[in-house]
């Protein structure tokens, strides 16, 4: 009986020793699949606390999004601070005159080219003509724009669409002035039930709230 007990003990020891080697090779092997490694570890170490839980990488999407929002808020805040007592580089009357002179030109390409040249003559060093046209969806308005000037307090750009579009113009911390060069558009304010139409040569002012 003692011999049988000793033989059984030796077999159990060899079995556990073999299982331990199996775990070690599974941990070191680079070609083992995650499922097979997990199965071997579960059999060799039934204690749940000893199981190795794979570390999950933290997603940086939320952080990146927060950084973008923070940048935009800081950018707008700086613009508002600099806007206090700021002397405008662009004169609305001058811009309106340039836009009205372009209305009688034969096509939109000629109109935009003439406007750009006149702006560069009136405001040297402030108007750039190398920016591309970019599609934009802002407040529901779907169109395309080309930026001619941008700073913390002012911007000048072309905006338009060959298709009908509508949306919310928004509330601004500065005055937004539109000069219609080609076509027409309508707008209305809170409490009004009839639109106001603006046509080529007209000026529309969105005052700051």
Image (spheres, rainbow, N blue to C red):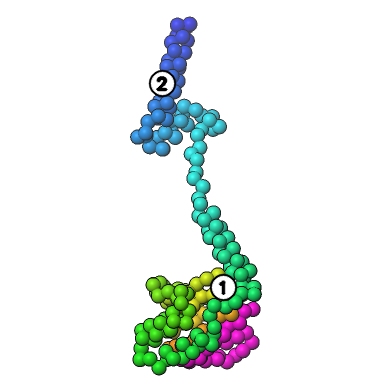
In the rendering, at what x and y percent does residue 96 appear?
50, 88
Decide: marks 1, 2 in contact (CB < 8 A)? no
Q: Does residue 107 appear in this view?
A: yes
- For the image shown, how many numbered marks are present on the structure? 2
Tell which circle, 1 or 2, labels the residue nearer the N-terminal end.
Answer: 2
> Is residue 193 left or right of 199 when viewed as pictured?
right
Specify whether residue 194 is painted magenta: yes
Question: Residue under circle 1?
Answer: 153
* Occupied quadrant, residue 16: top left
Camera-nearest residue between 48 and 157: 157
Which of discs 1 and 2 lies nearer the camera? The answer is 1
Is disc 1 placed on a helix, strand or loop?
loop
Question: Residue under circle 2?
Answer: 18
In the rendering, at what x and y percent does residue 37 appear?
42, 33
Task: Bin the neighbour count of mark 2 within 10 Å (Cα to Cα): few under 14, some 14-19, many 20 and up.
Answer: few
Q: Residue at x 51, y 84 (%)?
A: 178
Specify whether residue 7 is painted magenta: no
In the rendering, at what x and y percent does residue 6 appear?
46, 9
In the image, residue 9 above or below residue 53: above
Task: Give the number of the disc on residue 17.
Answer: none
In the image, residue 36 above or below residue 101: above
Task: Bin the neighbour count of mark 1 within 10 Å (Cα to Cα): few under 14, some 14-19, many 20 and up.
Answer: some
Q: Does residue 161 appear in this view?
A: no
Separation (CA) of disc 1 from disc 2: 75 Å
Camera-nearest residue between 132 and 186: 132
In the rendering, at what x and y percent does residue 71 appear?
55, 61
Is disc 2 placed on a helix, strand or loop?
helix
Residues in magenta, as a range: 183-209
* Occupied quadrant, residue 205: bottom right
In the image, residue 57 above or below residue 87: above
Q: Residue at x 48, y 39 (%)?
A: 54
Camera-nearest residue between 56 and 171: 171
């Amino acid at each position: 009986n003692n011999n049988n007990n000793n033989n059984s003990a030796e077999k159990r020891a060899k079995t556990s020793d073999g299982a331990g080697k199996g775990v070690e090779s599974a941990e070191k092997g680079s070609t083992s699949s995650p499922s097979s490694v997990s199965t071997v570890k579960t059999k060799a170490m039934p204690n749940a606390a000893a199981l190795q839980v794979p570390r999950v990488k933290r997603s940086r999407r939320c952080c990146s999004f927060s950084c973008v929002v923070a940048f935009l808020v800081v950018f707008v805040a700086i613009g508002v601070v600099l806007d206090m007592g700021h002397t405008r580089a662009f004169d609305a009357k001058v811009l309106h005159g340039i836009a009205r002179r372009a209305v009688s030109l034969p096509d939109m390409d000629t109109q935009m080219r003439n406007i750009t040249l006149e702006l560069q003559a009136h405001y040297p060093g402030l108007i750039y003509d190398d920016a591309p046209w970019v599609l934009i969806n802002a407040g529901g308005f779907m169109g395309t724009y080309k930026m001619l000037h941008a700073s913390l307090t002012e911007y000048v750009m072309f905006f338009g669409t060959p298709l009908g579009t509508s949306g919310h113009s928004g509330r601004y911390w500065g005055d937004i002035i539109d000069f219609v060069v080609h076509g027409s558009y309508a707008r209305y304010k809170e409490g009004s039930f009839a639109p106001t139409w603006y046509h080529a040569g007209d000026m529309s002012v969105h005052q700051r709230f």
